[in-house]
Amino acid sequence: MESSEEDRGEPLSRMAEWRDVTPLPQDDGPNPVVPIAYKEEFRETMDYFRAIYKADERSPRALRLTQRAIHLNHGNYTVWHFRRLVLEALNTDLDEELDFIQRIASSNSKNYQLWHHRRWVIERLGSNARAKELHLIKNILSLDAKNYHAWSHRQWVLQALGGWEDELDYCQQLLEQDIFNNSAWNQKYFVVTRSPFLGGLTAMRASEVRYSVEAVVANPNNECPWRYLRGLYKDDIESLVNNREISSVCSKVINTKNNYIFALKMLLDLLCYGFQPCQEFRDAVVALWTSDTHPLDPDLATAICDILEHVDSLRASYWIWRKNKLPVAA
Amino acid sequence: MESLTSPTVTQRDQLLVEQQVFSLFKTFYNMPPSSQSFMLELQRENHVEYLTNGLKQLGPSFCVLDANRPWICYWILHSIALMDEFVDPELEDNTIDFLSRCEDPNGGYGGGPGQMPHLATTYAAVNSLVTLGGDKALSSVNREKLYSFMQQMKDASGGFRMHDGGEIDVRACYTAISVASLLNILDDKLVQNVGNYILSCQTYEGGISGEPGSEAHGGYTFCGLATMILINEVDRLDLSSLIDWVVFRQGVEGGFQGRTNKLVDGCYSFWQGGIFALIKRLNSTKGERSIPLGDGEDSDPESPRTTASSDATEEGLNKDLSQDDSHSQKDHHDTSSRVNVADIGHNSSKGHAKVNPLFNSLALQQYILLCSQDLNGGLRDKPGKSRDHYHTCYCLSGLSVCQRSWLEDEDAPPLPHAVLGPYSNLLEPIHPLYNVVLDRYQEAHEFYTSS
């Protein structure tokens, strides 16, 4: 969008084009609370906006005015809403609108209104906008790989316009850069469960387990792959319990006697789901217990709760609560 | 750290925060006891001054919150109420007047006079008025119009739009349902399908996301859980996986993070910490009544009992801090003093049942008092960040939750060792579903159920 006279921050009262408009001051009342000491440009712009908004004037100058108002406060949802009404009335080129949003996003990518506006525009542009949009979101994520709005928007674009084909690879790329990025793991789950190009959760499970187990081995203290593994078996506890890869990575990590909290926790969960541990698991857990005065409880799940109460002492209350909820040993 | 490769962004950012926080803690431990006492004090006067000043005047940089002014009112008024301090009656009147100018003639409140009504600012405005209390404030809400505004915001998916043509998410559901419940205008039409929408937002991690598919997040988890409780569908959630997720959001710093592997932030003291207050209520009312709120089926009051302090052991502060031990009491799940919790807050004479908080209350209090306080007034996200009214509100709300986390009843007096620092740090109890001070909730509840 070309820079307009309104963009240059000059007083609207001095512009010929706005002469016919009587600015409408804010009805703050005589003694407002939380009053903001508006700068003159802000106050004046909003006074003119109020006038145009009240008159419901959907004109080119109204459009320019909303741009000026948005620049002064990205969070004014009333202005954004009115801008949409004006865009519709004027049947404006929405590709240019995307550029406008992008310029705003560069200074503030965590603003609800901006992203919502973007969705509105993309909805109207349709699948032609898809590639460019996915690319833009990638750029924003390259600056902040966990931007919540960007990720939600990305998911919306995929569901509304498609583009799933490269998404799993993209997740993998992000995870290569930062295996601790939970947003990327979440996106992975999203793709695996919803992509029309993959077979669905059950079909993808084996490869996803393998990937997650590798991630666990590389960083056993990384919560992400552990939760992801559990998530892969959301509605199929039996298969989780029977998966040798998962139970054996638990004992593998426990045996290192290092960074084993999540491994112990997973083993505890498995036991609660009915996992029947063989001796190697008992041995691994017993090996962690160094106290001579207090013998480890013969029930493995109870023993794990006791260990966790001590090694994850921040969450001691939780582990005591888990212990009290354990199914009574047969 | 295990990995031999160079640290990732997550690891690096986390390490920086840990270093800052632990250096603060180390300085604290090495102080003489008198200095330590001072550091653990809630700087009430300074906080109240900071807050009251904000209510009276805000600088030009606040223009970015020009569409959020009812929120600023709520953050300030609620914080002051938590500290049981007073707002000048003139300022109170001015607030009522100001908020009425934010009210849209067709219902709902906008971010400022003349702005479109918005569910979040409606929530903030109503909570502000409830916090102010009194007939004038409470009667100033046009409930009929507000109901029709909410109806218009209702979406077929079951969720709510924040404003006309606005975004749909779990936050919008919470703000709508919370306000409707508080004002006693909640009905089947508003509630329909909300549960389905929120259920679709519980992720594989156990927490709740803003929209279906997004990442589990503390703010949305609070909103989702509170909403499900308010509409009496909480059992549809997988509560054990939700609890499992949220307990792991508490970090070595003592504070909570909003999402897995993200940084600690003082505001999650409430969004995440408050979840435990909600769960606690559920555990106490389970099996006794299905609707935790409602009109008083007020039974005969239980004979008052004093809180048994003999069972609790006084643990040394340094021990707690240095070992990061939870304050475990041996008498958890004390069912002998189980009360009929008809409506928490309605029945003033009850027994004082004790529970064990599922999170580490003292560790969180330590984070709030030592890391979030700005000694000049106000509270913040983390050391190095600036104070603001939002963080002041939610850090203090979280602190209130912590102090009462060993008690089943929100309005029972906490034991001294439940309160980190001097007992004068004690804040007013909140109603965890709405995050308003409990006795203000009670007044509003009476007002809106009788009128």
Image (cartoon, rainbow, N blue to C red):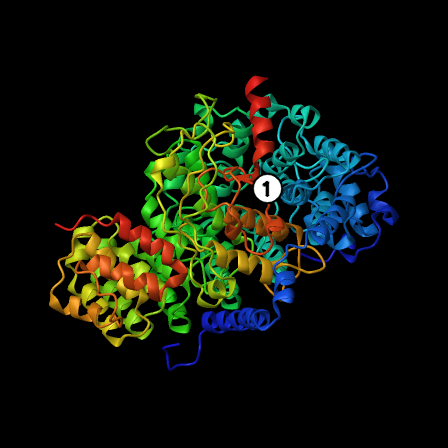
Amino acid identity at mark 1:
Glu
Q: Nearer the viewer, residue B280 or B115?
A: B280
- Residue A174 x/y as whole percent: 41, 68
Mark 1 lies on a secondary structure that is loop
- The chain ID associated with circle 1 is B
Q: Which residue is mark 1?
A: B428
The answer to whether residue A125 of the structure is visible from this angle is no
Q: Nearer the viewer, residue B181 or B320?
A: B320
B234 relative position to B135: left or right: left
A297 relative position to A75: left or right: left
- Residue A162 x/y as whole percent: 38, 53
Rendered view: B119 above or below A107: above
- Residue at image position (55%, 40%) is B430
Where, by quadrant of the figure, is residue B6 drawn?
A: bottom left
Quarter in which the C terminus of chain B is drawn: top right
Rendered view: B230 above or below B14: above
Q: Nearer the viewer, residue A307 or B349?
A: B349
- Residue A253 x/y as whole percent: 25, 72
The answer to whether residue A155 of the structure is visible from this angle is yes
